[in-house]
Image (spheres, rainbow, N blue to C red):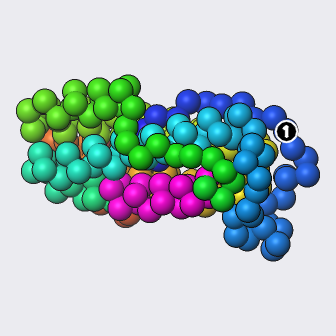
Amino acid sequence: MGLALSVPMLSFPGDPQNESSSRPEAAQPQAAEKGTLSETDRKFIQEAALGGLMEAELGKVALRKSSNDRVREMAQHIVDDHTRANERLQALAQAKGAETPDQLDAKHQKQVDKLQKLSADRFDREYVALMVSDHKEDIKAFRTAEAHAGDADLKRFAAGTLPTLEQHLRMAESAKQAAAGHSISPPHVAAPDNMSSQ
């Protein structure tokens, strides 16, 4: 859940003053007094951080359990990218006087525990299916934050993270097919038009 991230769709109050996120004076997170983030922005930060932690943790499990090269490649990308994204999110949150979780809550830990108990083959199928659905939800939530977050730095974070989440979704879709036993082209290469159907 593409910070993971099991980030539910959030509605952000419109802020026309922050519609343009390319102002040069806002290139770095701006220090802010505690309490300046809206509750919706704070909720997005919490959910994004928890999702990122869960996806990184599940990626580590996949690296231990999976023997599928495509699944392992995706898992390594997810571990690396979500760890970096969570570090950026934590720095942004601290600059705004907000806190981010440093461990999974019970809901997200339950998901990790559930997948850890599966056989290797079943783990691969369920893990990649979760990464597909989770990254679709992440992308929706991050697009909403990019468009409607009240804080300009949070908008920039969401916009900057979206391409990585989209890449993870493509990799997860490719790994899902590989885990099901299909022969497909690598995720970074377009499949030829005459490729046999799955």
- Count of marks, rendered view: 1
Dominant SS of magenta comes to helix
In percent of width and height, residue 184 lies at 25, 52
Q: Amino acid at mark 1?
A: Gly
The residue at the point 8 percent across, 33 percent down is 119
Q: Residues within 10 Å of mark 1 (few under 14, many from 20)?
A: few
| Front residue of this view, candidates 102 and 169 | 102
In percent of width and height, residue 23 lies at 83, 68
Residue pushed farthest front?
A: 34
Residue 74 seen anywhere in this rendered image of the structure: no
Q: Which residue is mark 1?
A: 14
Part of the protein shown in magenta: 78-93
Task: Tell me the SS state at disc 1.
Answer: loop
Q: Tell me if 45 is positioned left or right of 21 in this view.
A: left
Tell me the quarter of the image containing the C terminus. top left
Tell me the quarter of the image containing the N terminus. top left
Residue pushed farthest bottom?
A: 24
Which corner quadrant of the image does residue 80 belong to?
bottom left
Q: Is residue 120 magenta?
A: no
The residue at the point 17 percent across, 35 percent down is 116
In percent of width and height, residue 8 lies at 56, 30
Q: Is residue 80 magenta?
A: yes
The residue at the point 84 percent across, 38 percent down is 14
| Front residue of this view, candidates 1 and 90 | 90
Residue 121 seen anywhere in this rendered image of the structure: yes
The residue at the point 78 percent across, 67 percent down is 26
